[in-house]
Amino acid sequence: MTTVGSGVSGDSPAGAAGAAVPPDAPGVMQRRREVRQRPVGGLWLPAGVALALLVVPVIGLLQRAPWSDLPSLLGSARLRDALVISAITSATAAGASVLLGLPLALVLSRCGPSLRRPLRVAVLLPMVLPPVVGGTALLFALGRRGLVGQWLDSWFGWSLPFSTAGVVVAATFVAMPFFVITAEAGLRSADAGLVEAARTLGARRSVAFRRVTLPQVAPSLAAGAALAWARALGEFGATITFAGNLRGRTQTLPLATFEALEAGRPAEAVALSVVLLAVSVIVLVALRDRWLSR
Amino acid sequence: MRWMGSRRDASGRAGVRVAVPAALRQPRNGRLRRPPAPPPSQAGQGDASAGGGGVGARLGEDGGISADVRVSVGGFTLELDLDVPAGGIVAVMGPNGSGKTTLLHCLAGLVPTEAGRVSLAGQVVDDPAVGIWVPPEQRRVGYAYQDVRLFGHLSALENVAFGPRCRGAGRPAARRSASAVLDAVGMSALARAKPARLSGGQSQRVGLARALAARPDVLLLDEPLSATDRDVRPLLRRQIQASGATVVLVTHDPADASELADEVLILEAGHVAS
């Protein structure tokens, strides 16, 4: 107590008994702050290079954006088609990721380590796999003569490749792992003691899950869904491999952007990129509590 | 039905049996008591209750708590024989790791017995030898946890109303009874507060209210007053007595034991110390 800064003893209303200095006295706070690490001078240069690599392309894009022509460019039939296809397929893929991914995340969070390891590999593989490889794999699994596709074709007459449904399948393939991993982490950190408390209060397992676990993990589920949706929206490789690039059917925003550049319409490509960039910023803002506030 | 069938042990009924003097088992005079619960309506469970054991009439089996169990949790084994008459209060004391919380978990159905039998309020709820297992939500227990375990997304009032809601009460009725119980533990001023805003002692009072609000036959209290202010403890003790439930009270506070308990059980390393 005596080592605390000298200002304290003057201000404190210590009586004859000599009241102890509270731990949150000003002197103590300052000491603690000094211990925190600050960036050293030599770090700024490499950190700046890394930052420039990340930020300069975005600035370049915004600087070239044809702001005044943006409404008319985005109003063109070709881009409107791509917008609609992208909106529908990415939302459906995100929804499918949640609906199918939540049970998988639950299994992952509750099964023993011997089952969890192979399951994790299966879930993480699409995340690290080059999307083109994913698209090729989908083609040979779900194509008309594929492992599963032949049955879909002969039983239901379904053909997924080069269809809008195929875009959804490809996007779900690459996006669902993002939801599963995020949801699993949330479920794993959920407090099992609260479920026990709910059950001793008369809640069946399903009720305890709905009324105690779900509210607890809702932020994780929302974050996972947003990530999955953003990944589905940006999906390119698996989509073009599995579903092709058919305007009005399978041509999403990224595919339309690529085509516009290839066909020598850079203004259109920049306009589309600005739209995708805006969406990304919105996702980041929506997740700010999770990633930006620490 | 029972989910740990492979660990069943029909020999059962091992363990130290402690005869508590009959005088100690009598409820004290002047205490508010609810009459013992009526015998269970489920015929199957009634039969099982009559068939097993061979111990003769056990005090706890006609409405209180009767547990003659062996429970293993992660290398630790608890073996004891406990009988509490309906409306009785037993205090369980003993050093850390002696099995006090494991006993409550066993009675609540959070951990299955390896061998033996548990009967609560006249209903056999766990007897591996005959394959009876009643899950926690179907046991009429109220449990105040040592680590409180309030639901963080619900207000104090909603926490307390959770039990009545699960037991079938409508939302308005559940809120009414919850606010009455919160009032009884002196927490009505903070009814709308989320648990994060409550102090340790306040949380504990809400946790106790939540256990009481379910109107349980059996109250399991794990150091329910440890963080509360000394001057509210008499009030809280009165609420525990007034519940009329059969109570197992884990405590380190000799005052709790002497004020509340009809008998005191001392555990040591998973056994009743003699």
Image (cartoon, rainbow, N blue to C red):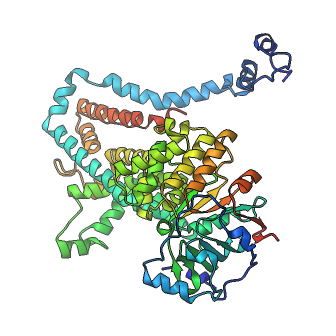
User: Which residue in the rendered view is the most extreme toward the top?
Assistant: A10
Residue at 49% x, 55% y is: A187
Based on the displayed image, in which of its 4 quarters is residue B201 positioned?
A: top right
Residue in the foreground of this view, choosing between A119 and B239: B239
Q: Nearer the viewer, residue B251 or A204?
A: B251
Residue A21 lies, in percent from the top left, at: 78, 22
* Residue closer to the observer: A230 or B248: B248
Query: Who's the residue at 76% across and 14% down the image?
Result: A12
Query: Which quadrant is home to the N terminus of chain A?
Result: top right
Which x, y percent locates residue A286? 39, 36
Q: Is residue A126 visible to the viewer in this orientation of the structure?
A: no
In the image, A260 versus B137, the foreground residue is: B137
Can residue A13 be seen in this snapshot?
yes
Q: Which quadrant is the C terminus of chain A positioned in?
A: top right
Q: Position of residue B105 (x, y in %)?
A: 61, 65
**Image coordinates for residue B77, horizontal then vertical, percent:** 72, 72
Residue B190 left/right relative to B231: left
Above or below for B73 versus B57: above
Residue at image location 76% in from the left, 75% down from the top: B18
Identify whether B90 is placed above or below A154: above
